[in-house]
Image (spheres, rainbow, N blue to C red):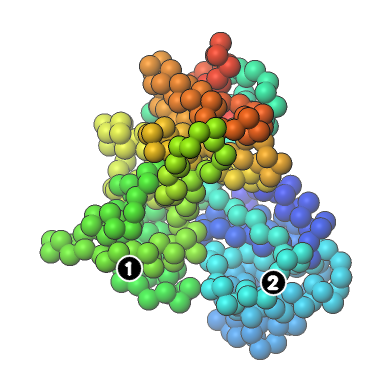
Amino acid sequence: METYRNRLVDDLVRKSLDTFGAVIIQGPRATGKTTTGLQVANSSVRLDSDPQLPSIAETSPGVVLSGDTPRLIDEWQLAPTLWNAVRHEVDQRSVPGQFVLTGSATPPDDITRHSGAGRFRRITLRPMTLGESGESAGAVGFTELFSGDAIAGIGGPTVEDYASILVRGGWPVLVAQTNRSPQDYLGSYLDDIARVDLPGVEVQSDPLRVRALVRALARNTSTEVSATKLSAEAKIGESGAEVSAQTVRRYLDALTRVFVIEEQPAWAPHLRSKVRLRTHPKWHFIDPSLAAAALGAGPNALLGDLNTLGLLFESLCIRDLRVLSQPLGGAVYHYRDENGLEVDAIVELNDGRWAAFEVKLGGSKNIDMAAGNLRALEKKVSQQRASELTSLNVLTAGNTSYTREDGVNVVALGHLAP
């Protein structure tokens, strides 16, 4: 049996069970949700282990809810009425830590229309960060970036290493079993999205159109892209037929519900001036390896195309920032205004503190330009928001981390740790 690799959500799950009646561990397939849930469960039932179990759960929910607590119910969305059954059971027992629900899809809103407020805590399990996969040098603590401390570190992955990491991704099975082919594994993963995952959330989909949209999304990773543009770029076969904008919007929603893609919303702070903000989101795959697979790009191809490598590296940074910020109650945004000032990521914690990040593969000129953008943003926000700023950071694919004389941190992604 393989040794369990600790995940950053582990403590969050345990702490949440001390407060909430049920914890929902959600996320894409193959990220280890069941294994993570089993670390805290005293009994379990897997609804996908027997074709009869979802029907039993729907008609006689007490059968699957009975057991030592916390009780793990895996792939709970296969029996959506369990939502209300768990809610009622939590209310009746009136003690926290009763259930852990895991699922790789979000049911339609009407299934969960009865509020789980105060009863459920949702926790997203994304693919592994570099720290979780053992590839981070761990020289820079993420929490340090919210305390104003100077940082320093050396070592970690090279640019060539990042190209391989981007193709492999943070999928536990690919991290643990290096003999597997990432291209074959993730190519099959993408095929299953349209054929299995989307129909599983009651979305009628054409596999050809879904794959065309996925390729268009891969080409536009880490950018603001409209449904209209995606429609124009999602060509099907030799005929060049487009996927309609209406279909694109429907598929985007469905791909979000099965945790294949994530929206990075625009940040909307109070500014000192009347500059208008751009409010379009950026799109990222839950792991940039899916974009690489959709493009058919291996490590050598990425190293030969620095533009694509840079965009996927930015998406890798966003993935790790999301995972690192979740236990702190943080959310990840991006900033862009009508004057063209862009900042790749803003991490804002629930207490109002925030840190800004630009992403660059490396190079002193690029780092200087990124630092200039960060300083420009600092001058634009209101005095209140400026007082809550904890650090300005340039994330790189280099192997040194340090604090510049102007106070901007240069942080190698492969140095970040919780």
Q: Secondary structure at mark 1?
A: helix
| Residue 253 % position (x, y) | 44, 64
Mark toward the start of the polypeptide (1 vs 2): 2
Category of crowding for the residue at label 2, using alpha-carbon neighbours closer than 10 angstroms: few (below 14), some (14–19), many (at least 20): few
Category of crowding for the residue at label 1, using alpha-carbon neighbours closer than 10 angstroms: few (below 14), some (14–19), many (at least 20): few
Which part of the image, by quadrant, shows the C terminus?
A: top right
Q: Gap between marks 1 and 2, in whole Å?
A: 30 Å
* Vertical arrangement, residue 379 with respect to residue 276, above or below: above
Q: Secondary structure at mark 2?
A: loop
Which residue is denoted by mark 2 in the rendering? 115
Dot 2 amino acid type: Ser
The disc placed on residue 198 is none
Which residue is denoted by mark 1 in the rendering? 246
* Vertical arrangement, residue 82 with respect to residue 178, above or below: below
Residue found 63% across the figure and 68% down from its top: 74
Residue found 55% across the figure and 50% down from its top: 126
* Vertical arrangement, residue 223 with respect to residue 370, above or below: below
Residue found 81% across the figure and 58% down from its top: 19
Quarter of the rendering containing residue 43: bottom right
| Residue 98 % position (x, y) | 79, 67
